[in-house]
């Protein structure tokens, strides 16, 4: 026994133990591990949360499973470690600090680059640990000694080496290409950082007048403000409507000038009019067509999202959306706007600030993705990387198949600065350290590129850079690759795919074998959790109200096979009640069997034959171990938590503890063994209460997290006891149901009569009279027949298989029950008739909302079931 000598509280109080135990674990370095090549590794690299963040329910659903898996594998004897770290979150962090500066009436430019970066580091030191303290409150146990930050010195070395190596291999290049530009963040975004959103807009049908006798072309566009940059009109080569136009010219309706009509198979004949205006400087599809055709790429929108360049004078300097309205007005005045239609369109928005992105031509740095994507695609198709649930495998593969080059340069200050220097002739020199001269012309007047790298560039190196790469460390040798990545589905593109690509390229193999994609946590109405919408939940509020253990249990218990979770807070309250049930079970054991509290090691059972109840509960424990093991292997945390709760509540507390009140010689050692096993099974999910109770029971190792996981293969399997006890408990349930009709007091025992039962069942029930009496409150079991015990004249009855169970009662009880059932049957019949007529009405089924119709059908099935049960009970009176 260790620190616990104080009496147990009457009720479980998480606030009294959780903080204390976490401080003990952390002081003892309970979560620390060293690489051990003699043990099978189990390593999870924590998805690095942003330093700007606070804990939210997404952390709860993503990080709780990680903590469970690592604790489970540690108890299984694995070299288990959970590697923590945080992401510098370039754009997000810079935005937060810039907002702080704005409160002081300053911008980052007022400070200058170096002072601004120093300010961000200061902010990180002040607030970066907030999230970690919240993780501690949730009971998360990563190896805090191995904490990393994506901009720490070691990570920065890894980033520089990867950039320089990829550049040397020709996989990083600089070029002018169409990129996603966020005017609000004043930075480029990769394709994966652009989210799609349906918004209402207008489809403008515009006439492009034919030149030199050519027929007119009619174009449908949502962006008339970009007409100034049109360089062609494209039609599908097989579209008979436009074949006479191909090779001719039409007049651009704004900044009028003749432009050619070309044929290209990329044109969708079904959209709009089937003719497409080609604006290579402001649309990705148009850009691809323009590159194939060698068309010019003029740009008329600047990085401030205002019109510029070759536009009509009144448009110069207008915001793009104001310019759209003016363009429509001018087209209408010139008789060129044929019609307008309301149109729902999918637009790209910045994943950070929700600003509509602008496709713009810009000189940027890119990674060639095809050579990196092909091995990552093969790893999935050949089964070396698998996704759980399996449907996300296709999501991953589809994206890799259609991948485009990755724009990695960002126009912000906070982040890894590009290791690129330019001379006066704009030659680029790429190096890990500042070069003395230009690699191309030997000039020495060098200036470093102002841009920083996409946040996901450093995050993509996480599984091996966190282990010390590019140094050859013991951690890298033993712990790479990791075993499982637990993450959210929205970053399969942003993060998962890039880790696989870069891991294979630099380490020679994929960084993990399994990707567990966790569900999205919704509110009870199915809405996405959002503080701004008032649908958000703070997991720390749940910890305050229910405790960390109950919060963790409440989260994972609702995670069913990858389905999104409509989170019910009531499940946390149910889990809190379960904690108290477990607490009371141990309290009972220690009070009833003082030897359990006095022993320092598990008790040995006396040399006597085990009872049926003993054998039953040991078998139930063995089945639960196997069920929980299988659930954890399948990442089915809901099944694991259900299995443990069912065992503790229904089998240990409701059955065995009730029986153990007889204080039979074997009860203390069996109860101690069963409760300890239950605590071990529950520990990965509920670490605090299980540690507290472990200390109060006899145990072999000082901390439950260091104990050996119960061995399902070596556990006590007893199918005979399982079968016999099932029959006894079935009989007990029948008796209790009968006793419930007249509401017999608990202390009143009555003989129970059985007719039609097999001699084996009668013998079993009479051998186990103590169980029948204690659980079923039956003083004796009498077999009807052979003239020994006649059927009672006045009794309630219930069917049990082929047998009939009778409980003698007064005739008045029978009459009251008959009257009650008659009323219930009549009322249920009426309700069934009403719903059947409603569902037979074609008008109701067609007009009522689908969920209402389905609700009525469910109600009808429930009523039919109730009627059948009531009728059966009525027939037995």
Image (cartoon, grey):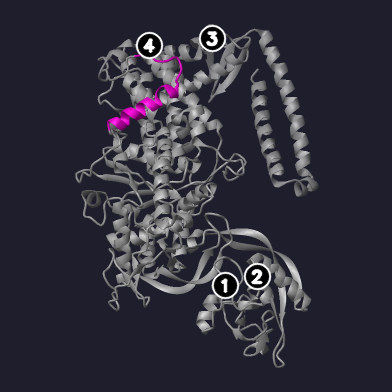
Quarter containing the C terminus: top right
Q: Position of 639 compared to 315: left or right?
A: left
Badge 1 or badge 3: first in the primary sequence: 1
Badge 2 or badge 4: first in the primary sequence: 2
Cα distance in 3D space between marks 2 and 4: 78 Å
Q: Position of residue 614 (x, y in %)?
A: 35, 20
Q: Is residue 87 visible?
A: no
Asked which secondary structure carries label 4, the reply is helix
Q: Quadrant of residue 345?
A: bottom right
Judge whether residue 7 is colored magenta: yes
Cα distance in 3D space between marks 1 and 3: 81 Å
Quarter containing the N terminus: top left
Q: Which residue is mark 3?
A: 746
- Dot in front, 2 or 3: 2
Vertical arrangement, residue 39 with respect to residue 190, above or below: above
Asked which secondary structure carries label 1, the reply is loop
Badge 2 or badge 1: first in the primary sequence: 2
Q: Which residue is mark 4?
A: 591
Look at the image and give the residue range highlighted in magenta.
6-28
């Amino acid at each position: 026994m260790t620190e616990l000598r104080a009496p147990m509280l009457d009720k479980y109080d998480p606030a009294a133990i959780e903080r204390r135990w976490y401080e003990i674990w952390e002081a003892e370095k309970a979560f620390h591990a060293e690489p051990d090549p003699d043990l099978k590794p189990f390593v999870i690299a924590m998805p690095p949360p942003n330093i700007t963040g606070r804990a939210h329910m997404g952390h709860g659903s993503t990080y709780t499973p990680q903590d469970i898996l690592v604790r489970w594998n540690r108890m299984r004897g694995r070299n288990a470690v959970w590697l923590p770290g945080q992401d510098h979150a370039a754009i997000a962090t810079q935005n937060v600090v810039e907002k702080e500066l704005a409160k002081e009436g300053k911008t980052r430019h007022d400070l200058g680059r170096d002072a601004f970066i120093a300010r961000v580091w200061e902010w990180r030191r002040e607030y970066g640990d907030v999230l970690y303290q919240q993780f501690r409150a949730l009971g998360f146990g990563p190896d805090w000694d191995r904490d990393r930050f994506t901009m720490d010195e070691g990570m920065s070395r890894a980033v520089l080496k990867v950039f320089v190596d990829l550049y040397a291999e020709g996989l990083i290049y600089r070029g002018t290409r169409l990129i996603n530009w966020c005017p609000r963040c004043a930075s480029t975004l990769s394709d994966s950082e652009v989210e799609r959103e349906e918004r209402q807009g207008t489809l403008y049908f515009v006439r492009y007048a034919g030149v030199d006798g050519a027929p007119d072309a009619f174009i449908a566009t949502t962006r008339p403000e970009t007409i100034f940059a049109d360089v062609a009109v494209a039609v599908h080569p097989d579209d008979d409507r436009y074949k006479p136009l191909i090779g001719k010219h039409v007049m651009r309706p704004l900044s009028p000038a003749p432009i050619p009509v070309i044929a290209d198979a990329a044109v969708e004949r079904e959209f709009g009019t089937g003719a497409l205006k080609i604006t290579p400087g402001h649309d990705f599809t148009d850009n691809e067509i323009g590159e194939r055709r060698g068309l010019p790429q003029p740009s008329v929108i600047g990085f401030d999202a205002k019109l510029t360049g070759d536009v009509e004078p009144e448009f110069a300097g207008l915001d793009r959306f104001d310019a759209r309205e003016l363009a429509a007005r001018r087209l209408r005045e010139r008789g060129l706007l044929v019609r307008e239609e309301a149109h729902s369109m999918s637009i790209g928005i910045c994943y950070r600030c929700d600003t509509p992105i602008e496709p713009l031509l810009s000189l940027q740095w890119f990674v060639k993705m095809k050579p990196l994507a092909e091995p990552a695609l093969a790893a999935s198709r050949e089964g070396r990387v698998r996704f759980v649930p399996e449907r996300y495998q296709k999501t991953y593969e589809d994206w890799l198949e259609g991948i485009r080059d990755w724009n990695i340069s960002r126009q912000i200050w906070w982040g890894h600065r590009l290791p690129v220097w330019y001379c006066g002739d704009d030659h680029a020199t790429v190096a890990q350290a500042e070069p003395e001269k230009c690699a191309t012309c030997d000039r020495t007047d060098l200036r470093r590129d102002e841009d920083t790298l996409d946040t996901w560039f450093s995050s993509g190196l996480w599984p091996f850079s966190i282990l010390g790469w590019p140094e050859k460390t013991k951690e890298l040798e033993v712990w790479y690759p990791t075993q499982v990545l637990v993450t959210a589905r929205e970053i399969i593109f942003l993060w998962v795919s890039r880790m696989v690509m870069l891991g294979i390229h630099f380490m020679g193999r994929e960084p993990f074998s399994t990707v567990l994609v966790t569900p999205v946590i919704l509110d009870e109405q199915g809405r996405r959790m959002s503080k701004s919408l008032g649908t958000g939940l703070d997991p720390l509020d749940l910890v305050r109200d229910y405790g960390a253990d109950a919060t963790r249990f409440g989260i994972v218990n609702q995670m069913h096979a990858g389905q999104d979770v409509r989170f019910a807070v009531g499940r946390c309250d149910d889990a809190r009640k379960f904690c108290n049930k477990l607490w009371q079970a141990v309290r009972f054991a220690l009070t009833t069997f003082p030897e359990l509290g006095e022993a320092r090691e598990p008790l040995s059972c006396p040399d006597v034959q085990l009872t049926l109840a003993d054998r039953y509960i040991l078998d139930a424990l063995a089945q639960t171990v196997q069920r929980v093991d299988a659930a954890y292997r399948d990442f089915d945390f809901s099944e694991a938590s259900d299995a443990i709760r069912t065992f503790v509540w229904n089998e240990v507390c409701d059955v065995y503890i009730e029986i153990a009140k007889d204080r039979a010689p074997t009860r203390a050692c069996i109860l101690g063994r069963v409760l300890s096993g239950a605590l071990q099974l529950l520990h990965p999910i509920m670490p605090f209460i299980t540690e507290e109770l472990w200390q109060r029971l006899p145990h072999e190792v000082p901390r439950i997290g260091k104990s050996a996981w119960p061995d399902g293969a070596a556990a006590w399997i007893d199918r005979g006891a399982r079968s016999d006890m099932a029959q006894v408990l079935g009989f007990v349930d029948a008796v209790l149901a009968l006793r419930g009709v007249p509401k017999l007091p608990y202390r009143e025992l009555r003989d129970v009569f059985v007719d039609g039962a097999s001699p084996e069942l009668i013998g079993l029930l009479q051998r186990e009279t103590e169980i029948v009496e204690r659980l079923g409150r039956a003083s004796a079991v009498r077999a009807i027949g052979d003239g020994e015990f006649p059927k009672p004249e006045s009794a309630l009855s219930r069917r049990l298989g082929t047998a009939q169970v009778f409980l003698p009662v007064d005739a008045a009880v029978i009459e009251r029950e008959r009257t009650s059932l008659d009323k219930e049957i009549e009322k249920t019949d009426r309700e069934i008739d009403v719903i059947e007529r409603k569902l037979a009405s074609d008008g109701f089924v067609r007009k009522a909302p689908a969920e209402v119709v389905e609700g009525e059908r469910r109600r009808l099935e429930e009523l039919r079931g109730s009627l059948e049960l009531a009728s059966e009970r009525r027939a037995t009176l």
